[in-house]
Amino acid sequence: MGIFILKTWVHYYVALLRRLGAFRFSLLLALAIILGDTTLQMGLAVYFNEPLDIHDVSRSFILSLVITPWAVYFLTVVVGDLEEARQRLGNTVSRLRELLAKDQQKTRELELEIVERQKSQKLLEEHTILLHSFLETSPDFFFHRDLKGAFVSCNKAMELVTGRKEAEIIGLTPFDIFSEEYAIQASTA
C-alpha cells in the first residue's frame, strides 16, 4: 500500500528536485524513463518470444527525451508553488505572532489599568465615606442644592434646626423652609 501513496512520491521527487537542481534532476529522470521503458520493451520481447529490435530501444530513448522536459517543468512549477505557499504561510505565522505579542502586551496594560482603577475607586469610596461621616457629625449646616436652588441633600444639623427629616427637605427651596430674610442669605450661599 505504501508504494502507491502519491503524496509520499511527490514529497520524494520534490526533495530530490530541490537537492539536485533542475538540470541534474532532468538527467536523472530521463535516465530513469529510458531504463524503465527499455526494461519494459525487453520484458515484453522475452514474454512474447520476439526479437528485440533497435527501433524499440531508440523509441524508448526518444520518448524519454520528449517526456522529461514536461515532467521536469511540471515538478518545477509544483515546487515553486509550494515554496511560495510556504513563504506566505511563514509570513502569516510571523504576523500572527506579532499580533499575539501586541495583544498580550495590551492585555497586560489593560489589566494594570483595571487594577489602578479599582484602587482609585476603593480610595474614592473611602474618602466619600469619611467626608460623609464628617458632614453628618458636623454641628454646622451642610446642604447641597441643584441648579434650580432645590435641596438635594443635607446633614443632621440642618434636620435638627428645621425640625424636618432629610427626605422632607429634598426638593424644597430655602424659601419653603426658612424665613424670607434667612432664605435670601441661604440662597446666595
Image (cartoon, rainbow, N blue to C red):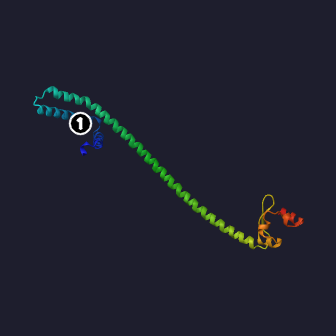
Of the pair 24 and 30, the residue shown nearer to us: 30
Q: Position of residue 84 (x, y in %)?
A: 39, 40
Above or below 149: residue 44 = above
Of the pair 180 and 69, the residue shown nearer to us: 180
The image quadrant of residue 24 is top left
| Residue at the spot 63% in from the left edge and 64% down from the top edge | 121
Q: Amino acid at mark 1?
A: Leu
Above or below 171: residue 68 = above
Above or below 141: residue 25 = above
Q: Secondary structure at mark 1?
A: helix
| Residue at the spot 26% in from the left edge and 32% down from the top edge | 68
Whether residue 55 can be seen here: yes
Quadrant holding the N terminus: top left
Quadrant holding the C terminus: bottom right
Report crowding for label 1: few under 14, some 14 to 19, many 20 or more residues within 10 A (C-alpha).
some
The answer to whether 90 appears left or right of 159 in the picture is left
| Residue at the spot 55% in from the left edge and 57% down from the top edge | 109
The answer to whether 111 appears left or right of 56 in the picture is right
Q: Which residue is mark 1?
A: 28
